[in-house]
Amino acid sequence: MKKTLLALAVGTAVSVAGVAASAGTLDDVKAKGHVQCGVTQGLPGFSNPDDKGNWKGIDVDVCRAIAAAIFGDASKVKYTPLSSKERFTALQSGEVDLLSRVTTWTMTRDTALGLNFAGVTYYDGQGFMVRKSLGITSALQLGGASVCTSTGTTTELNVADYFRANNMEMKVVAFEKSDETVAAYDKGRCDVYTTDQSGLYAQRLKLTKSSDHIVLPEIISKEPLGPVVRQGDDQWFNLVKWTLFAMVNAEEMGISSKNIDEMMNSKNPAVRRFVGKEGTFGENLGVSNDWAVNIVKQVGNYGEIFDANVGPDTPLAISRGINALWNKGGIQYAPPIR
């Protein structure tokens, strides 16, 4: 039983002995000329191929930003679509250089798998979606329901805990691939679909008639989603981490893809450090000193990638909420470049 619960919690039951990275991922990436990024098998707004096969989304933009920092070219990324069950094994084995695919930062994943989370791209929480025709307005009315979810995710444990805590019965209907889960819910094989709330808004777009479904108000968990790398390679860990921090800091300082050229001439010390006019911050990461400029110019700041992929003017229409900057009512925050 203990082993089964651990497998559910971390999304894999493979042994993690000896999976820590040997130092040199950045050198390997430079040698092969691209970043190999593990992404979802298709989640609109986060990582999803368009009709031409081009990958788009917040998680994709993190991968592109890393490529921009390393090569000065955000296009130097190759994508490996991974299921929830496959993702950690793919990273541990070196099949991918990092995961950027709506993966929740938990203690077990951060300590028992030989992996490191490099920050939080999107603060999320698990929710529920049901058909409007059921007349349900609260998750507390879901007793006796059948619940569709994906295997190898934190959602299985979260939903079990929620129903148990509220003395409700349920039946789990689980699938390995998210598209299988959505299709099963759409065909009526279950009453409820549960995953991260952002995922519910994204997957609702795939339903036969999306307007027939509502996302219930309850959030039953903390789901901080972010990029993941192997332990044992601090240089690569630092680069991935500070790439994300650079996008958050850029938004806070008012630096965007639209004004980055103008900001190159700023006399503000913090901006001058950001654009590489003062200090050796890029060199300390193993890249050029204009690394942050390349990120913002080619990909954008955090607010730009949020608005472009999941914001109010996109089909997902998600408000910033707690993903707003710390000084704008949210909790997005990055250490300073200094």
Image (cartoon, rainbow, N blue to C red):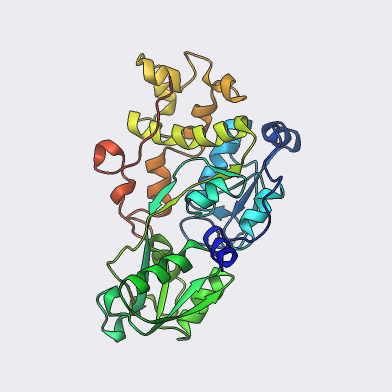
| Total residue callouts | 0
- Quadrant (top left/top right/bottom left/bottom right) for the N terminus: bottom right
Across and down, in percent, residue 54 comes to 59, 55
Q: Answer with the quarter of the image where residue 259 lies.
A: top left
Apparent side of residue 43 relative to residue 78 in the rendered image (left or right) = left
Across and down, in percent, residue 48 comes to 54, 59
Q: Answer with the quarter of the image where residue 6 lies.
A: bottom right
Please say if 302 is above or below 170: above
Query: What residue is rendered at 47% in x and 68% in y?
Result: 156
Foreground pick, 185 / 43: 185
Residue located farthest toward the front when viewing the structure as drawn? 2
Query: What residue is rendered at 30% in x and 71% in y?
Result: 216
Apparent side of residue 330 relative to residue 1 in the rendered image (left or right) = left
Foreground pick, 125 / 178: 125
Question: In this view of the protein, can residue 266 be seen by the observer?
Answer: no
Please say if 231 is above or below 167: above
Please say if 182 is above or below 7: below
Question: In this view of the protein, can residue 19 be seen by the observer?
Answer: yes
Q: Answer with the quarter of the image where residue 210 lies.
A: bottom left
Across and down, in percent, residue 25 comes to 69, 36
Foreground pick, 299 / 32: 32
Residue located farthest toward the right when viewing the structure as drawn? 31
Query: What residue is rendered at 41% in x and 49% in y?
Result: 122
Across and down, in percent, residue 218 comes to 29, 66
